Every structure is written in C-alpha cells, then in structure tokens.
Amino acid sequence: MIRKSLAFLLFAMLALGLATGCGSESSSDKSGGATGESTAAKDCSPEGLDTLKSGVLTIATDSPAYPPYFEDDDPSNGRGFESAVAYAIAGELGFTDSQVEWVKVPFNASYAPGEKKFDFDVNQISITAAREKVVTFSVPYYTANQAILVAKDSDLKDITSLDQLSDARIGVQIGTTSLEAVKESIDPATDPKVFDNSNDVVTALKQGQVDAVVLDLPTAIYLRDAELPGSRVLGQFEAEGGDQWGALMAKDSPLATCVNKAIESLESSGRLEEITNKWMSESAAAPMLD
C-alpha cells in the first residue's frame, strides 16, 4: 500500500483498509492466494529454484519504504515487518542475507500483468480476486487486525481492554468489517455512528463527533503518523474478515510452492508470529487489547 505521495498513500490505504473492509475488492480465497500450489514442487533450495538470477533471491518493494513495514527507507537492513518477513522467507529457502537483492517496484506496477523483474514482492499487497487473475500470491503472511484510533488528548488514551470502550461514541464506515467488529467485540452501549465514507469517519474524529474510530490496523497507523498528529492507536484486536497480504509473484511462478512452504514453516514454528508481534505491535505502538 506504499504510495509515491502521502496524499496518494492515504487514498490508497483507505481504499485497501476501510474500503476493502467493506468488501469492494474482496479476495476470492481468504485462505490465501496459494495458486502456486498448482505449480509442481521443486527443490526448494537456491540451487534448485528457478530464480530470476541464479543463486540470488530478488525481492521487490516500493520506494520510499515506510515504517513499521520497513525502517530507515532501507529494505536491506532487515528491520521492519516486511523486511523481516522477506529475509525469514529467504532463510527458509536456504538463501543467506548476502544472496538477497532488493529492487524498487512502484506499488501499482507490482500487480500489473506481465513479466516481473523480481522473484517476489512484499509491499502490503492485499490478496484480491482481481489481482489473482494476473499474478500469483503466496499464502498470506499477514492478516490485518482491527484497531482503535483516538484523537489527541482523548480521555480514552489509557485504556487496556475493549470493555473500557463500552460507553464510548464509536465511529465506523458503513458496510465495513470494522462495523461488524465493533458490534461483536466491543458491543457499545450506544450504537456506533456510521458514516458513508472514510473521509467522514476521519472528520468526525477530528471534530469530536466520536470518541474513537475503528478501522484496520495499517490504516490506523498511517492516519496516526501522517494525517492526525498527536492521535493514538490505543490497540488492536482480532476480527473476522481482515485484509490479507501475500508475497506477490509473476502469474504461475515456479517459486510459488516453495514460497508457500516457507511461509507455512514460519507460521508453524512461531517465527512469523514473533516477527508480527515485534513490528506490528511493539514497534508500531499498537498493543493487543483484551
């Protein structure tokens, strides 16, 4: 969801966050792209994989590369959620850090049809049915949680559980998974205020019409860091229907089966959860709420 400019980034992230939440571009298979499973499994080693360059794993992302997904605009330093995930996948495939090369690919170009100048791309790219027609996604390496965003100086800034939001005036966008999450996980005493679009949700928070807004975590982080100075992400919580991100590859990439196996191994070992907690909770200052 990285963008060339902040304005475009906001538009796109809201589209992928709030709008995606409302199902305007839903994945056909929320269990993950995994279309590569149809590709015959090969030797999942640097010597056996049909990579762009022999013995090298070429990974793409956009520029600039923003936190908490990357740190210091340098994907190669291993810091940030997606940098860490990428190197972890590479490690599972047998590549050393020195065998990983990064290339810059604009977000919109990543999922365009045609040949790719990378082996896979990690760039907060949502797995959607439309994109799966022209590219192959790995199984998901991240599913977005819902998050609570409050304005600067909010009386709610010190809460640690969802129960403490029961009396809050909560704003959400109509038709989104966030609305369902509010009803099921928070069950506020007052019905949430429902707005027609994401801009109205943000405006309501700015003008004090609501005490908090609920939206997906990546969008909440962006709004906090770029659009609402002083605002705070109180925390995050799991909910059904979260936006899922996968490693994007060329359509029917021969690497898909091995990349899927690598992600599944990271998940079963607990390493993926460890990375997610470190960068999408602790470093992002977005703790899990009970």
Image (spheres, helix red, strand yellow):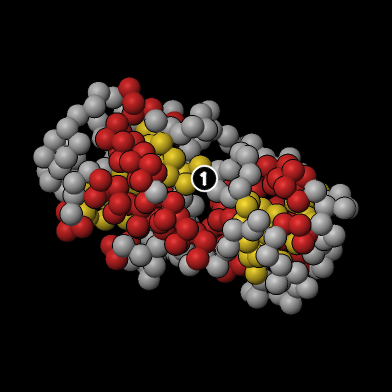
Dot 1 amino acid type: Thr
Quick check: 76 left or right of 2? Answer: left
- State the residue lying farthest toward the right: 190
Looking at the image, can residue 153 be seen?
yes
Relative to residue 223, is residue 132 depicted above or below? Answer: above
Measuring 15% from the left and 42% from the top, which residue is drawn there? 46
Relative to residue 139, is residue 92 depicted above or below? Answer: below
The image quarter in which residue 45 lies: top left
Quick check: 86 left or right of 203? Answer: left
Judging depth in this view, the residue of 283 and 250 nearest the camera is 283
Return the x and y of residue 224 as percentages of the image width and height: 61, 67
SS class, disc 1: strand
Relative to residue 179, is residue 76 depicted above or below? Answer: below
Q: How many marks?
A: 1
Return the x and y of residue 44 as percentages of the image width and height: 20, 36
Which image quadrant: the C terminus?
bottom right
Measuring 31% from the left and 36% from the top, which residue is drawn there? 261
Measuring 12% from the left and 46% from the top, which residue is drawn there? 55
Residue under label 1: 143
Return the x and y of residue 150 as percentages of the image width and height: 71, 66
Mark 1 is surrounded, within 10 Å at the Cα level, by few (under 14), some (14 to 19) or many (20 or more) other residues, namely some
Return the x and y of residue 18 as percentages of the image width and height: 65, 48
Measuring 49% from the left and 32% from the top, which residue is drawn there? 31
Relative to residue 99, is residue 54 depicted above or below? Answer: above
Looking at the image, can residue 134 be seen?
no
The image quarter in which residue 19 lies: top right
